[in-house]
Image (cartoon, helix red, strand yellow):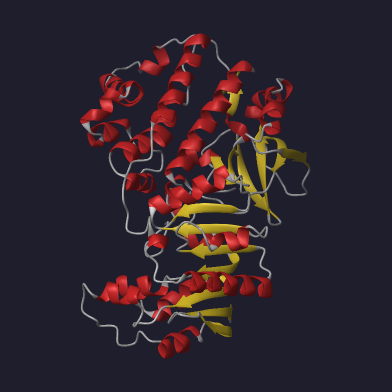
Amino acid sequence: MNNTSYKDPAGFVFEFEGQIYRQINLCAAEDYDFLTESGLYKKLTQKGLLVEHQEVSLSKKTACEFYKIIKPAQIKYITYPYEWSFSALKDAALLTLKIQKTALKHKMSLKDASAYNIQFCKGKPVFIDTLSFEKYKPDTPWAAYGQFCRHFLTPLALMSYTDIDLNKLLITNIDGIALETAKKLLPFRAIFNFGILTHIIIHSMSQKAYENTEKPAFKTARMSLFEQQALIDSLINTVKSLKFPKIYTQWGDYYKNTNYSEESFQEKKDIILHFINKVEPKSLCDLGSNRGDFSRIASDRNIVTLAFDIDPVAVEDSYLYMKSNKETNILPLLQDLTNPSPAIGFMNEERKNFSSRFQCDMVMALALIHHLAISNNLPFDNIAKFFSSLGKYLVIEFVPKTDSKVQHLLSSREDIFDNYDKETFESIFDKYFEILETINIKNSKRILYLMRSR
């Protein structure tokens, strides 16, 4: 059983012979069959909102509560909400609400509204939990309303009104950010957004009022279908009203302040293309991708590309560019490589860590080595070992001390980096990689390497 789904009595996800499957238990048979019979499954999959699946038979022994086995369309790279840009999380929220609104028209409802039920595939969010659907129970509130607010609305509101980095609270709050926490962190001006006032502030006060009562509000409340549809519309309008904040970050305008000439910048692209053509990878991780200029050299050639960066402005811009250009082979993601996403949840097994999820044929680390080695005091040995754990081939740019960007880093601190030089770099990386090719970038002091993991 996959440790992300053991809490669901309706079924569970498991891996068999390298493929992902989902077992449907007998207790969920009626809801699962109605999903198909009502036409909801067909409607959602035709629109690309729900992952498609096939019913299959396996030689694998199944549990006694077994009803059916389905094989969903396989998604290679699993990402988490705290790795998404603001607009990616917003799109995932709107997808969840659109699915709930469609489900109600087919006399069904989402019993779960977890952000982890969404993945990004071919440039778009898609719902992956087939067992989250149940028959609509007349005159009852939406069972997943509170979860939706914790997983989507509170992080989006905090990112929009308080600090763009507060989506990281999802790492330590696996079931979403509590309404009371959001209420304390939101500025006073947030109450003038009627949706925030209703779905976070008043909702939080209501929860607190019923904390010590014997009959929780959810079990005694009644809500007509019309009222639930109005609730969904209100949530949609609230999510749409939240905007990416106007902020300046260190790397958001990186390419406006680069020390490359136009000729050097283009040559760097040509060299990377040469390395990519030489290796012909099917997947690529670009570490420190910024807005994705170099990532798209790969994705434009139908190579599945994960573009990681620490800067929320750069990742937001790259995601919006992906959307507007309908790109299907790139996914911009937030990641701090000096503190990558950890394994979290019960026994640290519900959500996997960064390294175990992102194995690629090729890794790119451009204009990154000096930030890791100098800004963060990471030894070359640690960096090389980390890169070798992610992929077979490495394209890396060495930036010498004489480079203006390195000099800028050293201007505010003592130079204690006696071993930061080309010879030491090559010697240590040679323990983990075979250096296949080395090319100096014209009109620059920088060097590009193509390496293969030993």
Q: What percent of the width, then of the height, locates residue 433?
A: 55, 82
Looking at the image, which is closer to me, 38 or 292?
292
Looking at the image, which is closer to me, 71 or 3?
71
**375 to 331, vertically: above or below:** below
Residue at 21% across, 29% down: 188
Looking at the image, which is closer to me, 158 or 223?
158
Q: Is residue 377 visible?
A: no
For residue 306, side relative to residue 399 (left or right): right
Quadrant of the image occupied by residue 252: bottom left
Indicate the quadrant containing the C terminus: top left, top right, bottom left or bottom right. bottom right
For residue 370, side relative to residue 112 (left or right): left
Q: What percent of the width, then of the height, locates residue 212?
A: 27, 21
Quadrant of the image occupied by residue 154: top left
**418 to 176, vertically: above or below:** below
Residue at 63% across, 28% down: 28
Count every numbered label the image shows and give the total. 0
Q: What percent of the width, then of the height, locates residue 90?
A: 46, 37
For residue 20, side relative to residue 372 (left or right): right
Residue at 66% across, 29% down: 44
**211 to 54, vertically: above or below:** above
Q: Is residue 217 visible?
A: yes
**96 to 279, vertically: above or below:** above
Q: What percent of the width, then of the height, locates residue 451?
A: 57, 80
